[in-house]
Each structure stands twice: as C-alpha cells, then as structure tokens.
Image (cartoon, grey):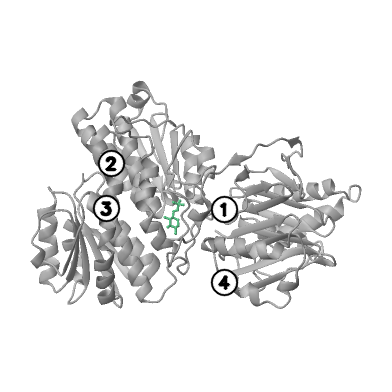
Amino acid sequence: MCGIVGYIGNKKACPILLAGLTRLEYRGYDSAGVSTIEKNGLSLMKNKGRVKNLYDLDGIDKLEGTIGIAHTRWATHGKPSNENSHPHQDNSKRISVVHNGIIENYSELRGLLESNGYHFYSQTDTEVIPNLIHYYFSKNTEDNSVMGFLRAVRDACLDLKGSFAIEVITDYFPDNMIVVRKDSPLVIGTCDDEKYISSDIPAILSFTRDFYLLNDFEFVLLSRTSARFFDSQLNEFQKNTDVIEWNSSAAEKDGFEDFMLKEIFEQPNAVRETIGSRISNNLTCDIDELNFSKEDLKKINKIYIIACGTAMHAGLSGKNAIEKLCRIPTEVDIASEFRYRDPIVDNNTLCIFISQSGETADTIAALKLAKSKGATTIAISNVIGSSITREADFTIYTHAGPEIAVASTKAYTSQVILINILAIYFAETLESASCEQLKDLKSEILSLPKKIEETLECKEQIFNFAKKVYQEKDMFFLGRGIDETVAKEGSLKLKEISYIHSESYAAGELKHGPIALIENGVTVVGIMTDEKLTPKTISNIQEVITRGAKTLIITNQVIDYNSFNEVIKIPNTSPFVSPILSVIPLQLLAYYISKEKGLDVDKPRNLAKSVTVE
Ligand code: G6P
C-alpha cells in the first residue's frame, strides 16, 4: 500500500527521495515525509497530503544529508494527519523508521513499551517499531557496535506479527541504513557507491538496473559501498543481483496527460510483448516457463483462478477459455473469499493466481493456503521477482511493462491474452480441442496488436459521448457470456476513477430485479461480440430502451445502428479474446468521464495500486 524510498550515497538524499516518492505516489497519497542523517542528528519533515506539499516545508531545501528514508502513506491505523505520517521516531529521536504493511500485535507491543516508560504520539502501528528497536538496543549494553544495532532491529522484527517492509536509520551509525521485509515488497537498487531502496522498481529504475530482490526476514546492513545480508540468526550470506530490463522511460508519461491514457495506448505493444515467442508465426504454442506433461494435466480435475479486482475479471475470461478448450471445471474466486471459505483443494487441483503487482496480500495468502493443501500453483504477474512469483510452483510473466495508474488497463489485456495462451497450451497437451479451432485462435491472437490499434481510433467518439454523460449518477453495463466479464471490468473502471455508481449485469438477469432502476435517461452500456448471444442481448437492451434508457453499444456484430444512441464498432475477432478489444472503449469512457469531472485519473480517492494489506 504505502510507498517507501531510501537513499545512501554521496549526493544530497532529500531531492532523490522526493523524486522517488513522486513516482511512488500511486501506492498511497494521503501523507508523506522524509528523514535524513544530518551533521547535528536526524532530520524529520512530514506532512498530511500529497508529496508535493513536502517541497513547501520550511528547511527541507537546507537538508544536506546523504542518507535518508521517505514514505508516502495510505492510511490503515490512524487517520491521515501530520502526527500519523511517516517517518516515525523513537522517544529519544535517534532512530527514524518508515514502514509499509500492518503490525497486527501493535497494541500489545505498545503496552509493553509503555510499561517500560515509552510514550506514543501517533495512532499508528508503526510507532512501536523505532521504540522497540531502541528498547532492545539500550538493553544490550555489551554490544554498542553497528552489529549490536542490527541485532536490536532483528529482535524487534521477530516480535512483530503481520507484514512489514521497513527502513531504519540512526545517528548512532550515521553511515548505515538497515532494511528488512516480511510479506511486503522491498527492493534495493545498487550502483557504484550508491544504494537506492524502494517498495517498487519503477521509482528507482532511472538510477540503476541492478537490483537485490529481498526475501522475507533477510536483514540488510547497507553502507555506501556495500550491502551485507543476514538471515534471522544473523548469519551472513551472499546474494546476487537481478538485472531488470524495463526501460525507465516506460515508467514516465512520455508526453501523455496521464499514466492511464499512456497505458491504454500502450496496449498494442504490451499485448505484443505478452505474446512474445509464446505463439510463433507458424502457429506453434509454447510456454517456456511450464513443463506439464499430458499425464500431469490429466490428473487435474479442478482449476481455480484466484485474484482480486481487475485481475479477477481477467480470470473470468480464463475460465471461459479453459472450460471450453480443455473441458476442466474451472472456478474463479476472489482471493479474500477463497482464503476463508475452506475451498475444496487437493493434489489434483491446479490453482492459477493472477496479480499485476504480485504483492496483493489476499492473493499471496490464498496462494499459501492452496500450496498447503497440495495444489499445483501457477502465478501470472507483471512484476519480476514479486512475492507471488516466489511462492508459486510456476510463474508466467505478462511482460506488459510497468503499470503506474491505479486503474489497471494494459495489465488486464495482457492477463487476458496470457490466460488464453495458457488454455491453448493445456488444450494442445491434453488434445482436448480440435487442431483447427486452436489454429484459428492462435492466428486471431497474433492479429490482436493491430486490431487494438484500430480499436483505439474510437477515442474521439468516446470523448464526445463522455461529454454528454459525465454528470450522471448511475450507469449499467450489460453483456452475456464473455461480454458479461467485460461489463464487469467496464463498470469497475467507471467506479474507480469517475466515482459514478454503476452496476454490471448478465443481460438476461436484468429483468429479475435491477430493471426496476431503469428510468428516463439512464445510460446503459451493452457489449455484444458473440454472434450466438447477440440477438439475445439486443432483446434485453430493447427492454431498457422501452423504459427510457440511453444506450451505448460496443460491438463487432452486424446490428441496426439506428436502434441505439451510440454504437462503437470494434474489429471482429474470436469471442475467446474479444475482451481485449471490447474493454478499450470502456477504459476510454471511464478515463474521459473522469477528466470531464476534473478528477485525478491516476490517483483516485481511497484506492491504491498495490493492496498489501488484508
Ligand atoms: C487494487 C487496484 C486494482 C487491482 C487490484 C488487484 O485494488 O486498485 O486496480 O486490480 O488491486 O491488484 P493486483 O496487483 O493483484 O493485480
């Protein structure tokens, strides 16, 4: 949720930290702060509100320190306020900490510290951490070296229940920083005499491509020239760096007004990258990361696709493809439900986890549960080295490039493509679908980047429609079959960034209740890409027109345009992959409505890009 940045090197830390926070703001943006090691002790500057407010703080431009930590917050414990902003310090103000995650036993630890004379000034769970470190460091009077301080950080972390990624600085050791994580992302970028720390790769990608990807409970003692790694027994070990190949300009706006618009327009390329060499021009399909034999797959009698939000909607198109092509019963589950509903999972179950960030707390917990019950697990993620990729038996990357806007767009289309390719791979291995059908689908997939480009040409038409409807209070999204999955995603996009209430419904279900809400002028969006289902959906749309609804239709079918207020024609394709095209006008609709309303498209209220809390 929250964003963390750190710097240790020879340059002034503060400008680097503020630039990093700005790039990380999508992780949370209700308050922000920095702490640096200055000649006369630790500085602490923090404020409620956006990162840009930090630039106005008195004295922030005078900070000279070359080691510092910074944080942008998405509130969990304690409302957004100056006191609750990070960094937090111990009572002696000699230790500063930033933290991402949730300390579940913080009130117990707070009680323990209070009974030892410590006071608390915020409502946060985080404030226990610097005090607990101080408590252990001052208790162990025999070792006041940096290793003794590392031991105190380790002791404090072993007391914490929940999730955390933390950075610790102290003026006891003004040339060091300590970082550690558990169930919350943290990476260290390294180059020459500098180290950059962040909860997310894009924030520091312009400085280096060489990263240490941390695992849980790896304690890192950083100096300008070294990164020393210790396990929780404080045994030192060696760790190699990974090279991240993302282009840093891919994480910038590249002339687009917002990241979301840029990412919508990146979809032809993102999908091209996802397809990569998995489907070749001679229509062979291979997924290098997997090695399932026919026997392995024959044993699988049930598949779960588990995810949250947009990734779950991508999972719905996966269910369609897997059930139709492989004839294996497939359920799509919301991760936060799956983990608590005692799902029927055994050695013959395959669980596929989809997560753009790979850090969604509920998805990670669901993955751990599925593994403990003996399931085979596959992670589909966009972020190399992210937590789900390290937990799962197999990982397939979408390679869509960094997605910064909170509302997911190119990650969704890449996930839909990838899960269709996975279904083809399974079907070929199992010989469960005809070669002809699979060949047609593969050539459709190869033609999609071009068709996405054509679909994006509807931009102007959608912009004009958005101008007509942006002040509305309610909208409905209808579809049948695969189109219903896109209705769900279109409705979510609208809610997320334009704050208009919307409902998505299976078109045939509308008459069983929700049609009571249809009245004069309500906008109903209909999606029709399946020849067999289109006449049925048209009948349902007629029912709302009769009751006064205004209609926007997204279709690749031959229909009577005059029956509807606006029709967006998209290129023809197989219904298996039609979400990749039909979702685009809906992404643009949400985008332009949000712009017309003057909202912050990339950072919608109350949301965060990566939900690392339960
Ligand atoms: C958050 C975001 C959504 C996203 C969901 C799942 O709620 O606001 O846009 O779809 O998390 O994220 P993931 O990284 O697991 O795909």
Instruction: Identify the residue at horizontal 48%, vertical 33% (top origin).
Output: 393
Which of 245/79 is in front?
Answer: 245
Between the residue at mark 2 and the residue at mark 4, the CA separation in whole angstroms equals: 42 Å
Disc 4, SS: loop
Instruction: Find residue 216 and report its horizontal and vertical position in percent.
Output: 63, 43
Q: Label 1 is placed on what type of residue?
A: Asp
- Is residue 281 visible in the rendered image? The answer is yes
Instruction: Identify the residue at horizontal 73%, vertical 62% (top origin).
Output: 12
Instruction: Find residue 407 and report its horizontal and vertical position in percent.
Output: 41, 60
Q: Which residue is mark 4?
A: 50
Whichever of labels 4 and 3 marks the residue nearer the N terminus, that label is 4
- Depth check, mark 4 against mark 3: the one in front is 3
- Characterize the local packing of mark 1: few (<14), some (14-19) or many (20 or more) Cα atoms within 10 angstroms: many
Between the residue at mark 2 and the residue at mark 3, the CA separation in whole angstroms equals: 11 Å
Between the residue at mark 1 and the residue at mark 4, the CA separation in whole angstroms equals: 18 Å
Instruction: Find residue 458 and report its horizontal and vertical position in percent.
Output: 25, 62
Q: Which residue is mark 3?
A: 581
Do the residues bearing badges 1 and 2 touch, measured as CB atoms within 8 Å?
A: no
496 left or right, relative to 434: right
- Is residue 579 visible in the rendered image? The answer is no
- Characterize the local packing of mark 4: few (<14), some (14-19) or many (20 or more) Cα atoms within 10 angstroms: some
89 left or right, relative to 266: right
Q: Is residue 212 positioned above or below 286 on the image?
A: below
Do the residues bearing badges 4 and 3 touch, measured as CB atoms within 8 Å?
A: no
Whichever of labels 1 and 3 marks the residue nearer the N terminus, that label is 1
Q: Which residue is mark 2?
A: 445
